Amino acid sequence: MSDDNLREIYKQDCEFYRYQDRLKWSRFQTIAMIEGAFLYAIFKVELSPSEALVWSVFGALLVLITSVVSYKDEADALSYMDRVKIFEEKFLKLKSRATSKFLRGYVLMRATIVIINLLNVLVMVKVFKLWLG
């Protein structure tokens, strides 16, 4: 493979990494907006207990689905980053600067998503208890 082809592949992998990383954080922001909207609907809007239960289940499912897709975006981004690092080490003779996943925000984002989903379960339990009466 020629140097021009390798450079083009490298550039594309870098672009794909940036795209997937931005997409992941965009989905994380979407999770926050969905969470805020459904919590507002449950606790601030005058809803019957059955309506509140429906909204809590619907909101929690949306947050869960968006969380799973966000994890997939993260995995895709990391796969492109692995390819970029291999190219840099092999062809550009650059040493890989190992940045911890904690500093890049992966661990914090994952922890936040897990906490949000666990709290959604608690909200659903509370609303279910209200529904039972």
Image: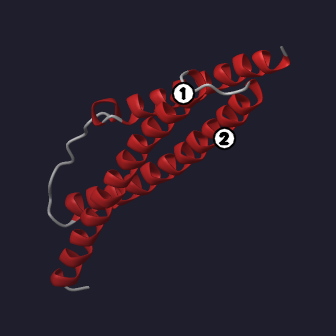
- Amino acid found under the numbered disc labelled 2: Phe
Residue drawn 14% across the image and 54% down it: 94
| Residue 77 in the image: above or below residue 103 | below
User: Quarter of the image holding residue 56?
Assistant: top right
- Amino acid found under the numbered disc labelled 1: Leu
Q: Is residue 25 left or right of residue 39?
A: left
Question: Secondary structure under badge 1?
Answer: helix
The residue that mark 2 highlights is: 58
Residue drawn 56% across the image and 27% down it: 45
Identify which residue, 55 or 71, lies in the foreground.
55
User: Quarter of the image holding residue 83?
Assistant: bottom left
User: Quarter of the image holding residue 130?
Assistant: top right
Question: Secondary structure under badge 2?
Answer: helix
Question: How dense is the environment of label 2, judged by Cα within 10 Å: few (below 14), some, or many (20 and up)?
Answer: few
Which coloring applies here? Answer: secondary structure
Q: In this view, does 17 lie to the left or right of 55?
A: left
Q: Position of residue 42 (x, y in %)?
A: 60, 27
Tell me, for residue 39, which label it has, or none.
1
Distance between the alpha carbons at the discs numbered 1 and 2? 11 Å
Badge count = 2
